[in-house]
Image (cartoon, rainbow, N blue to C red):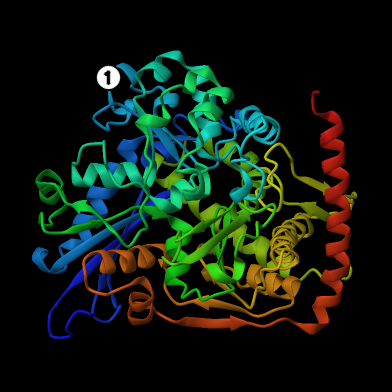
Amino acid sequence: MPVPTALPAYVIGLDYGTDSVRALLVDARTGAEMAQAVYYYPRWKQGQYCNPAKNQFRQHPLDHLEGLEATVREVAAQVPAEQILGLAIDTTGSTPGPVNAQGQLLGMLPEFADNPNALFNLWKDHTALAEAAEINHKARTWGGEDYTKYEGGIYSSEWFWAKIMHVVREDAAVAQAAHSWMEHCDWLTLTLTGQPLAGFRRSRCAAGHKAMWHASWGGLPSEEFLTYLDPRLAGLRGRLFTETYTADKVAGQLSADWAQRLGLTTDTVVAVGTFDAHAGAVAGEITPYSMVKVMGTSTCDIVVAPIAEVGAHLVAGICGQVDGSVIPGMLGLEAGQSAFGDLLAWFRQLLEWPLQAGLRQSKVLSAGQLADFRQELSDNLLRQLTEAAAEVDPADSHVLALDWVNGRRTPDANQALKGAIMNLTMGTAAPQIFRALVEAICYGSKQIVERFESEGIPIKQVIGIGGVAKKSAFVMQTLTDVLDRPIRIAVSEQAPALGAAMYAAVAAGLYPDVLSAQQALGSGFAETYGPNPARVADYAARYAQYQALGRFVECAAGEAAPA
């Protein structure tokens, strides 16, 4: 039964994004968002452990732990600690890291300090391209079960096994010291509860979508297949997990150490971890055959459907279809784009480079003044680009772009693909290119919708959450015109954190199931964008050109790839 309205009760949702962690304190009786706090990862912000030229993106766990303590203490101080009954964590994924037998991430140990291979391998890291290609080839040709079939039939370099294979091949010391590997959401939950690694409740969402876990073959891929991929994986399966758990289940309770550090009590229930997009979909009030688009640096497009209606049908070219990954008892389907806001940020940074280089030589401004000025410059540039691009008539625009600067996630994952811009002339200005990039991310979204529907999964409504959805009317209007369908925008500024709080409320026993928590704690919708009929035809014509450019680039990339 829901918590009695007379009894004060609160839950905390923690959302670990690419750049920062956000904590949200929610009134478990009403859904009111009582307090929020944000912490930006300092080491990540400085570019430590990353090499963008090699597509290497790693994160240090101290960024995450320091952010955990700072944000939770801030929001928890708003109410009596004993009234905070539950906590849940969502993170990016797949973001695995190697751990020892005690569950400690190797990068926290002195002998592996500052070793990128011993840290968290962020979702956007694409150093495992060769390993992903090898997994795909061997899964289809080894003569046994195709373990990629519930992940759209194509395994990505962004995911669990490809990243593990790459690290163990590159770093023998890490390979030998790694007793097991954990997704970021699982490791943080384990850390908070202080439980032994053996028997810890791992995330169904993380395992099903990224680690090729499926109940039909007894959990993870077989030992025979894993050792066929690489003999260095021998024995690892037995040190990982067999069972998985949905995010509404209890992982444990706060340890005494972490209860003290966070200003909470050891009675606080910690839910099983999950991924950010799936938690965001719950907060976005997802219903069967709705698509919740989580729009930030990348996108994740989440759909749920009744298991009985999808049956044994395999949806080709998406990221995964997993029983219970969003709402227990329903099938969760995931797709997405590897760059969304990241593509626009790349172009802004490209334009900023000469100005920023000049500022670095300044002897007039202090370090603090320089940082403030750089931020102001960056914000102003993005605003002016957006305003000018909105004035460009798509019917008169000839510049065309592909959104694959970080590879293509869906449909048909291929992280080796690159972005492209065509039809540039001496008269092309920055706003025209910026508009072409905005259109490109919208055309990429349209391809995803079309893939679902061509595979028999109807998309009955589109819901937008995330930073881009809340902050850029230009992007959202372009997207609704390209899709030629309305897009509803969720009210909450912190939808994934709110969704995590909903899971926490169920785990704490305040609601009987996720649907009940969703209905009671949902914040509703702020606005709806509707298609502009005058633009729809123009975008349809340019979308056809986008598809033709994509086919050309993909063909050229295939011809250039080594045999």
Quadrant containing the N terminus in the rendered view: bottom left
Q: In this view, does 169 lie above or below 19?
A: above
Q: Is residue 30 left or right of residue 132?
A: left
Q: In this view, does 251 lie above or below 466?
A: above
Location of residue 277 in the rendering, given as x and y in whole percent from the top left corner: 48, 59
Characterize the local packing of mark 1: few (<14), some (14-19) or many (20 or more) Cα atoms within 10 angstroms: few
Residue 326 lies in quadrant: bottom left
Q: Is residue 394 something one can see in this rendering?
A: no
Location of residue 221 in the rendering, given as x and y in whole percent from the top left corner: 51, 37
Disc 1, SS: helix
Residue for point 81% across, 77% down: 536
- Quickly name the residue at label 1: 110
Residue 344 lies in quadrant: bottom right
Front-lying residue, 452 or 432: 452
Quadrant containing the C terminus in the rendered view: top right
Q: Is residue 47 above or below residue 264?
A: above
Location of residue 378 in the rendering, given as x and y in whole percent from the top left corner: 55, 53
Q: Which residue lies furthest to the top in this view?
A: 172
Location of residue 325 in the rendering, given as x and y in whole percent from the top left corner: 45, 59
Q: Is residue 71 something one can see in this rendering?
A: yes
Look at label 1 and name its amino acid: Pro
Residue for point 69% across, 58% down: 441
Front-lying residue, 441 or 226: 226
Residue for point 46% across, 76% down: 285
Front-lying residue, 154 or 554: 154
